[in-house]
Amino acid sequence: SKKEGKNRYRFYSSELNIQNYKQLQLRHDLRMAVKRDQFMVFYQPMVRIKNNQILAVEALIRWNHPDWGMVSPDEFIYLAEETGVIVEMGKWLLKKVCEDQRYWMLKGYEPVYISVNFSSIQFYERDFVKSITDVLAEYEVDPKYLIVELTESLIIENAHKAIADIEKLQRAGIKVALDDFGTGYSSLSYLQHFNIDIIKMDASFLKNIMTDQTSAIIARAIISLTKELRIKLVCEGIENWEQLSFLRENNCFAGQGYLYSRPVPFLKIDEILEKGKCR
Ligand code: C2E
Ligand code: CA
Ligand code: CA
Ligand code: CA
């Protein structure tokens, strides 16, 4: 009955209502977020394990919302995809990244490789590759300093188109990384069809290596597989020394995680890059 429905509604925790309210507001405000200059780029170093040298930085978007503070991408990327805002947002981010890259270049730092995430919606936009190379040209950034991060599932969605566009990116000089490796439903077979430059092993493997034999075995297998295929491997989610020594013992090439540095705003990464090393 109507009355019951009302009671049931009241029964929901206010916590849940706040979440719903937040989502509604975020969805509503997202459209204006670029114009209102509310997005920020945080950077997290990708580090060479044997000597702590910084190999690249990953750009991770943040939304500095006037009511909700710093909103994490997990709370708005899917909204941006649903509403199509992701395309404009992505363009903004790429420009910001190019601006920062140029700044560091002019400051005379060792060249900074920057890794940028692209979701399926962005990848399957018409002129995806051109939209990137146009921005690089506009900012006079050498394409070799850009790494495009794509996920496995995106590649499976339309393998033909993915193969073609990955080749196009690489012909333009851009590097391609496979993100969240090992989490998809995909098989390893597509590695034969692509010339992937970098693989990022998903954080879930490292999370469990100390307690779960299988995770450790798979992590070791991924390390040796990528070595034989001559693909650079970056292990995600290094949070503690046990995980780092596991990677050291297994001669893993590169890693990323809170143990080295959290994603940090521009001024902080600038300091880190000036040193050129993590820790
Ligand atoms: P991702 O690409 O897999 O990025 C890694 C995520 O793990 C980041 O979360 C990062 O802050 C977090 N992380 C890094 N090191 C550690 C660690 O040691 N421990 C733990 N627990 N987490 C760690 P973040 O920044 O919240 O981003 C979440 C996801 O949102 C990203 O996952 C990516 O898929 C997406 N994303 C972020 N920025 C963008 C963007 O500019 N465009 C698109 N399309 N997606 C983005
Ligand atoms: Ca990523
Ligand atoms: Ca990842
Ligand atoms: Ca992810």
Image (tube, rainbow, N blue to C red):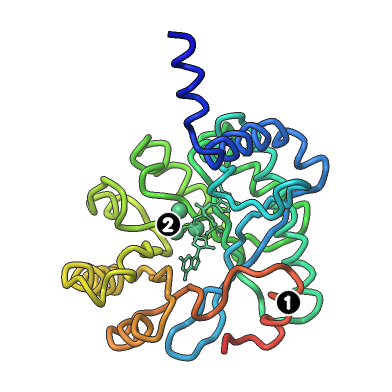
- Where 89 falls versus 273 (above or below)? above
Residue behind label 2 places its C-beta within 8 angstroms of ligand 2: yes
The image position of residue 175, as x and y in percent, is 51, 60
The image position of residue 71, as x and y in percent, is 64, 51
Dot label at residue 270:
1
* Residue in front for this viewpoint, 240 or 16: 16
Mark 1, Cα crowd under 10 Å, few <14 / some 14-19 / many 20+, is: some
Dot label at residue 22:
none
* Residue in front for this viewpoint, 191 or 26: 26
Residue visible at 74% across and 56% down?
A: 96
Q: Mark 1: which secondary structure?
A: helix
Which quadrant of the rendered structure holds the C terminus? Answer: bottom right
Mark 2, Cα crowd under 10 Å, few <14 / some 14-19 / many 20+, is: many
- Where 91 falls versus 72 (above or below)? above
Q: Amino acid at mark 2?
A: Asp
Q: How many numbered discs?
A: 2
Decide if residue 87 is on the left or right side of residue 188.
Answer: right
Residue visible at 52% across and 28% down?
A: 10
* Residue in front for this viewpoint, 241 or 186: 241
- Where 265 falls versus 69 (above or below)? below
Which mark is first along the chain, 1 or 2? 2
Which quadrant of the rendered structure holds the N terminus? Answer: top left
Residue visible at 53% across and 48% down?
A: 74
Q: Residue 262: which quarter of the image?
A: bottom right
The image position of residue 221, as x and y in percent, is 21, 70
The residue identified by callout 2 is: 179
